[in-house]
Image: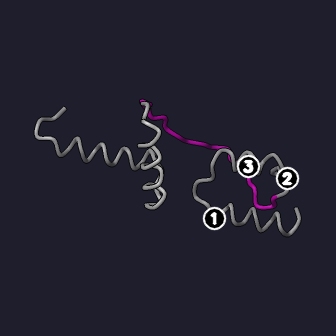
Amino acid sequence: MNKNERKRYEKNKEIKEMSIIDGSDFWDEHDFGEFDDVKMVHDIQFSLEKKKYIGIDEDLYSVIKNKAKKLNKSEDVLINEWLSEKARSQTNPL
């Protein structure tokens, strides 16, 4: 890996959420063998959460995406926060 690629990797390493496209582009050009600090993971634990996906108007989604970016949050997190607040504020529970 040359010096510029290493700098790009270090910069990307600092990004908390790399997009799938960015990650795909990066790994198209690199492999784990290039990095000395990669370690084998033997015990992975995770929990799956069920999600329900709904359609959102494109213009509304654009507004949400911009607001989420300004708040350094994902769109999913922001939408869930807003919907939770709205649901809790209702006098008649759903």
Residue 1 lies in what quarter of the image? bottom right
Under mark 2, the amino acid is Gly
> Mark on residue 40?
3
Question: Where does residue 44 sit, x and y in percent of width and height?
Answer: 60, 43
Please report whichever mark, 1 or 2, sits nearer to the chain's N-terminal start.
1
Asked if the residue under mark 2 is in contact with the one under mark 3, i.e. CB atoms within 8 Å, the reply is no
The magenta region covers 35-53
Numbered label tally: 3
Compare residues 36 and 93 and report the one nearer the observer: 93
> Mark on residue 14?
1
Label 2, secondary structure: give it. Answer: helix
Q: Residue 38: within the magenta?
A: yes
Asked if the residue under mark 2 is in contact with the one under mark 1, i.e. CB atoms within 8 Å, the reply is no
Please report whichever mark, 3 or 2, sits nearer to the chain's N-terminal start.
2
- For the C terminus, the quadrant is top left
Question: Where does residue 89 sit, x and y in percent of width and height?
Answer: 17, 46
